[in-house]
Every structure is written in structure tokens, then in C-alpha cells.
Amino acid sequence: MAAGQPPYFGAAYYPEDWPLDQIDADIDLMKQAGMNCMRIGEFAWSRMEPEEGRYDFGWLDTVIDKLGAAGIATILGTPTCTPPSWLYQRYPECIAVRDDGVRLEHGARRHACPNSSAYRDHCRRIVTAMATEFGQDSNVVGWQIDNELYLVRGLEDHRGCFCDECVGKFRKFLQERFGTVEAINAAWGTDLWSQTYQSFEHIPPPRSGTWHHPSLLTAWSLFQADSYVDFADDQADILHRLASQPVGTDMTQCSDREPDARRWGDAVNLGKRSPKGVIGRVDRRFCPRFYGAGRRIEQDTLGCGGGGVIRAPEESSMAAGQGSNGKSRLTDLLRFVYLPLPVA
Ligand SMILES: [Zn+2]
């Protein structure tokens, strides 16, 4: 049987968390729920690459084949928001530095630096390996880059990473936009309270605990947001080159960790520059009633399409009572609807 056809209704599925012999029972549940698509893989880096350079896609291949045989398509997530422990041990520079200068520990997710050259190299490697393995698989109908791109959490808020590479790239970012330090001083009105800078090297990363110029804070946030767009673009380039399926990503709820919705929109609309289109996830968190940094988040900005948007129900009755307490492997993610979208 061919994998499901659009529109896709499904859930996030984490077969790496469960014994593989349960998959048939899981598929039965999916079929009972009328699902025809699963999103898998986006947190499974350590299973796909148990040690550096040794890839294991056999288990993932088995899952995708079994789903496909049941008429259930797969959207594959790249696992880059969950770097494995060996990467942290061998390349600590991949991991983000908090705004007080402390490097984060290995942990659950979203603790790597989007600007780390070493991390970007390893991300390109795992994405290339995945795209080579699954880029022509007819049961895979789309790619999700990373998962819920947002700024690394610091002491006070989601201010992003403060490692040396980030600070250096931030000053370059300012130099490209303003040209001279005198132009920054003029634009930001730094004579107030003796904040005038004498060189780009004097412009500090806005660590917590200090009162910072609002324009510095804004520029830092924009730089960090752009870093994630660039990070996602890196993976999109690989996937567009090696895979035949549409490419997209997903977003978390809109909040102060996402300082510029339009930039996030750039990240989601990766498929605009590809004839293969983009695949978008629609759920209640993508509804336009959410606001970020005072801006209304438009559905089409988030890659969910313009007219004719299909909206998932606010709550799935099947999800009611299940929550995320482990009672079911099909928990609170039942309300996803995936759409292949036309290229703008
Ligand atoms: Zn960094």
C-alpha cells in the first residue's frame, strides 16, 4: 500500500523511546485514529549516530517501512536540537554559553549554539547522512528541519548564546549594517549616559545584570534570530540538494524568545526557493491569535499557507484525558495536520 495522501493528519511519534516490537500495536492505534502521517526522528540523533561517524538508520528504516505498508506517510525531522552526549564531551564548543558566561551542560534539547562552527559541521554531517539514506524514499513525504527553533534560555530570559563565536559574529553583523562605529553612535544616541563606543570591539554582548541600551538589546535579539534562520538555511541547502521531498520546519508558541516573527517566517518558508514546495504544520499554536513581541503572527508568515488554510481543531477529542503523562504514545500531539503547500 502506498503511503498516505494529503491532507495529512497525524502526530509526532517517537519509536526510539519504545521497544520496536510495539510498533504494530502503535500502528493499529494510528489507524483507529484515522491518521495517515507521522512525524519522526527529530530527537533521535544519538540513535542515528551512536558514536561519531557511525550511523545506524536500520531501525528508522524499519519504522518508515512499516508505517508506509500501513498507508502512513512519514515526515522526517533532522535531530539537531538534541545533540548527543559524545558530541558535548568531545566538542564542548558546540554547546551554548549562558549570558553569565557559564557554558550549558549536556541536556535535553535546544542547548547548542547556532553559530558554533563545530556544531554546524556536525549538523551538516548528520543531515547529509539522513538525506542520502531517505531522500528518495517514497514513504517520506517531507522534511522538518530541527525542531521549534528559539533562542537559548539564559538566566533571565531567552537571550541566546553568548559564546565567543556569537559575540564575534554579532560585531560583524553590526559592522555590515552600520559601516562605522560613529554611525551606530549616531543612530542609537549613545551620548546619553556616556554610552558612546570607540570601536566595534567595545560593543558588549548584553549580558544580564547590567542595564543595557535598548537598541543594543534589540540588535542582539535580531542577530540571534538571524543566526537561527542561517542555521536552518544551512540544512535546507543540503536537503534541497539531496532529497526529493518538500522541506520545512515547525515553530513553538510565539513569545519573547522569538523576537521577530518575520525572521522566523523566513526560516519556515524555506521551500519558497525550491520547486519542491514546503511542508507546513498546522496546529492550534499556529492560529493567528498568537502574538509575538507585539506583532501579529500571520499564518502565511509561518508557512501555513494563505487562503484555504486548513485548521486543526483546538483540541482533539482523542487527546482529551491523555495529556503528556505517558498514558499513551499518541499523547498531546494528535492535532497536527500537515500540508504540502504550493511554492509562493
Ligand atoms: Zn554561541
Image (spheres, rainbow, N blue to C red):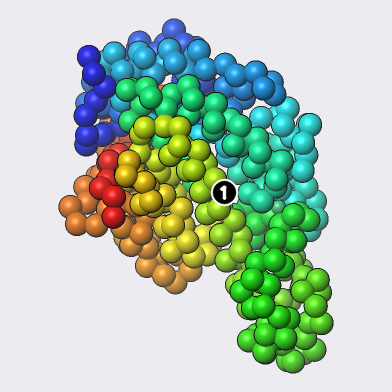
The answer to whether any part of residue 155 appears in the image is: no
> CB of residue at label 1: within 8 Å of ligand 1?
no
Q: Residues within 10 Å of mark 1 (few under 14, many from 20)?
A: many
Q: Is residue 300 above or below residue 60?
A: below
Q: Is residue 334 above or below residue 30?
A: below
Identify the image quadrant of the N terminus: top left
Is 154 placed left or right of 305 in the picture?
right
Res 248 → quadrant: top left
Res 328 → quadrant: top left
Residue in the image at 74% along x and 54% along y: 165
- In the rendered image, residue 115, in percent from the top left (x then y), is placed at 66, 51
Residue in the image at 33% along x and 22% along y: 139
Is 253 placed left or right of 68 in the picture?
right
Res 174 → quadrant: bottom right
The answer to whether any part of residue 165 appears in the image is: yes
Identify residue type, mark 1. Answer: Phe
Q: Nearer the viewer, residue 293 or 330?
A: 293
Judging by the rendered image, the residue that carries numbered circle 1 is 231
Badge 1 element:
helix
Residue found at the very far left of the displayed protein: 308
